[in-house]
Image: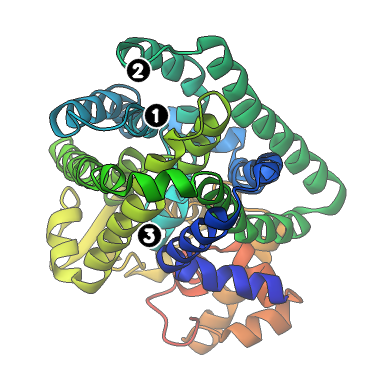
Amino acid sequence: MMIIKITQHIRQNLGICSFTVFIAGMLIGMIHPLPLVKLLLPLACALMLFPAFLDVNKERLGYVAARPLPFLISLFFNILVSPLLMYGLTALMLTKSITGLTVGLLIFGMIPAGGMGPAYTGMLEGNVNLSVTISAVSLFLTLCSVPFWSWIIIGKVVHVPIFLIVKYLFLIIILPMILAVLVRHWVIRRQGEATFADLKGFLQNISVMGLLLMLLIISVTNARFIAGNAHFILEMILPAISFSLLLLIAATITGLAFRLSYGDRVALTIGATTKNTAIAMALAMTAFSGTEALSIAIAGPLVQLPVMLCYLNVLTRFPGWHNRLLKIGFKRSNHMEALLIGETTIEYSSDGYLLRPELWNENLARRIAIGVGIVDLGEQHWAVINYVREYWENNKTAPLIRKVCQSTGLRLDQLQGLFPVGLARGACRIAGLPKPDGCV
């Protein structure tokens, strides 16, 4: 579909697209502020927030409950460290700034778990399961933490509409979460997992349009304010950059100090660093005056996004540093990693593929699947896994994606929905194959 190709292109160039939309909105707003554009706020919020909750299910929550340490550390960062850190940075760096802009940064620091967190985690082969749960539970806890910190911190600067904050947090977070759970249950029950994977992939792809729409609304309605106070707005950049970098460094060091697994460390670092720009913007545009959303737009798409993209590039472009710093804590032997299951030691390559495929079984497959973010292997997952496994046993090589599609009757987009990290890093790894050449 054309819209999917467009949104994927936007995701790949989100920083440039965000900046372009922001400038375009300013130009429009300088001609006319278009007050009716605020009527598009519910649509922007729905596009941004509803798809993020489609990944939430009880299996993910149960998995994290069995390994709570990285989850609890992320909550510590999101609920306690982030608000206090942003308050300290604004107090230190913004002594003469416009009040509304300062309040916007404080709101940004209180809203945890950016919607792109699971996607970033998947790109780095981290624990997507943990990342999704961090996002969902942290956002749920904002119903209490945001009113509390607003009263404690923002209340020192301006009058805080606590009732409005609680009201709009409920509308922005709880209603989309409930709706997403109901839609997930209904679609899987009536249409099956493949249809749900198609729907989820489509909605998550177009969710980026909600972010751009929100940026357009903010820039159009505040264009004249921006033009008259440009130097104050530029002052927001330094505390915003400092905030993201300090959280990134602190979370990385904490993960290493607690000797968390690689996947958990990636999920923790990203979950603690990224903040939910969509919810922060929506809250600023509804419960507050709207001016606050300007500094959120700076701290989110124009600062947080580039910081996270740099983080991704560093880990993918410098694999030696990646392995030395982020894969501490495994039992190692000549660049191998090992997992003890019962009395059997299962050895992996540094890329996560089995070194002895003959030890593979379905229970091990489920363990591997959890590591790549697939909690519940359904019928279609097993159809692909069993085909890939059988093909390798007969040919000692992995099948091409074209053959997988032909043999299972699944379309390419359905395969991508079933194995978001890819066929090689998903199905082939779960099937217990050595690192493949063809299944990519």
- Which badge, 2 or 3, is on the more N-terminal residue? 3
Q: Which mark is residue 385?
A: none
Q: Amino acid at mark 1?
A: Ile
Depth check, mark 1 against mark 3: the one in front is 1
**Picture quarter containing residue 380?**
bottom right
Q: Secondary structure at mark 2?
A: helix
Q: Badge 3: how crowded within 10 Å, few (<14), some, or many (20+)?
A: many
Identify the residue shown where x is 19% and y is 54%. Answer: 326
Residue at 55% of width from left, 45% of height from top?
Answer: 221
Q: Which residue is mark 3?
A: 125
Rounded to the nearest whole Å, what is the CA distance between mark 1 and mark 2?
8 Å
Left or right: 199, with 12 as reference point: right
Which residue position holds label 2? 154
Does the image show residue 402?
yes
- Front residue of this view, candidates 80 and 58: 80
Report x, y in % for residue 252.
19, 45
Find residue 107 and name its label.
1
Please report contact status of discs 2 and 3: CB closer than 8 Å, yes or no: no
SS of the residue under disc 1:
helix
